[in-house]
Image: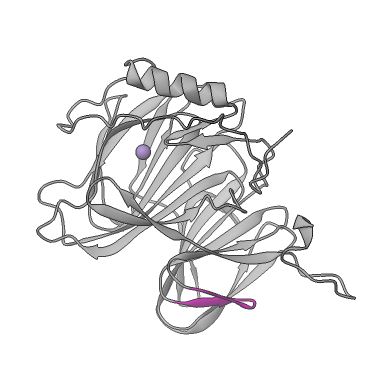
Amino acid sequence: MEDQLYGGTVATAPEPESVLLPGHDVPLGRYTTVRRLLPQRQRRMVGAWCFVDHFGPEDVTGRPGMQVPPHPHTGLQTVTWLVDGEIVHRDSLGSDQPIRPGQLNLMSSGHGISHSEMSPADHPAGLHGLQLWGALPEEERSGEPRFEHHAELPVVRDGDATLTVLAGRFGSTESPAGVHTPLVAVEMVVPGPGSHRLAVEPTFEHGVLTMSGTVDVGDATVRPGSLLYLAPGRSELRVEARGEARVVLLGGEPFEEDLVMWWNFVGRSHEDIVQAREDWMTGRRFGQVSGCSAEPLPAPALPTVRLKARDRHGRTVG
Ligand code: MN
């Protein structure tokens, strides 16, 4: 039985499930390779977070850096968090916004938006960041597109750790980023070895990744390139840093809707995706990105089989 894949039978109340998920490398644009940590086959989501890409750290001296030409989105929010480098975001609302280390870009697609993400020609030497997607709930996915840039985010100090609240609420601290479901994203930077206790919302499921450094959480050792999934039912996480580390905690209320994710689209059915693809290829719905000289990305061919809606565990429905 699938339910027994990860746990044994124990006499006392079991710890909530915890699974270390290895990511895989994926090319993004022509010049960047990312570590994709979500979605995975057996774990599609952590709360509403349905997509987690970690890029860098890499030295892009003499190279183009991030070069992702105009492409569409529907049914999701993109959250870009940069710790090194520079990327210019342009979108079909007319936004033209550089993002620099310590800043957050948040784009809600609503029904449809298109954007490009390109390092400028005179970019810094490094490139290091995260891009997350949050699935929009049914009542938001037909809404208007929106873009936000946050140059300042709330910071909490805990001993020698510096915690930045990227999205949602962490304890009594709330990010200004506008989100659509109960969720959280927090970055914790620690300067050296040490133990840190993080109070978390018990009804949330969580994911822990490191952008640099190694941490132990329970029995799991988390290094860059993997994501530790933690089921709901905990009020505290104990994170043991083996040295300097940059840790990201993601979380949220388990997302109950079944989704179809294909290319840059999040929908509810095969028909949703077919329509989105057709709208992009025929110049409808997603607008145009002005100020970006790169040609828009064509959508790949659809698979020959129908796309199936899946729940957050990756199970198909019906
Ligand atoms: Mn995008």
- Residue at position x 60%, y 32% from top? 137
The answer to whether any part of residue 144 appears in the image is no
Residue closest to the eye, 53 or 272: 272
In this view, the residue in front, 251 or 6, is 6
The residue positioned 36% from the left and 22% from the top of the image is 280
Q: Quadrant of residue 90?
A: top left
Q: Position of residue 204 (x, y in %)?
A: 67, 53
Q: Is residue 214 above or below residue 86?
A: below
Q: Residue 187, percent across and down? A: 46, 61
Ligand 1 located in image quadrant: top left
Give the position of the C terminus as an image quadrant: top right
Q: Main secondary structure of the magenta part?
A: strand
When the figure is inspected, residue 126 is found, relative to residue 175, above or below; the finding is below
Observer able to see residue 246: yes
* Residue at the spot 49% in from the left edge and 35% down from the top edge: 76
Q: Return the residue found at the far front.
A: 304
The residue segment tinted magenta is: 214-222
Location of residue 91 (image quadrant) = top left
Image spot of residue 205 (x, y percent): 66, 55
Which residue sits furthest right?
Answer: 11
Does residue 137 lie above or below 41 as drawn?
above
Q: How is the image coloured?
A: one colour
In the image, is 314 to the left or to the right of 163? right
Q: Taking 313 as reference, is 84 left or right?
A: left
Q: How many marks?
A: 0
Q: Residue 95 at what x, y percent from top left? A: 28, 30
Magenta span contains residue 218: yes
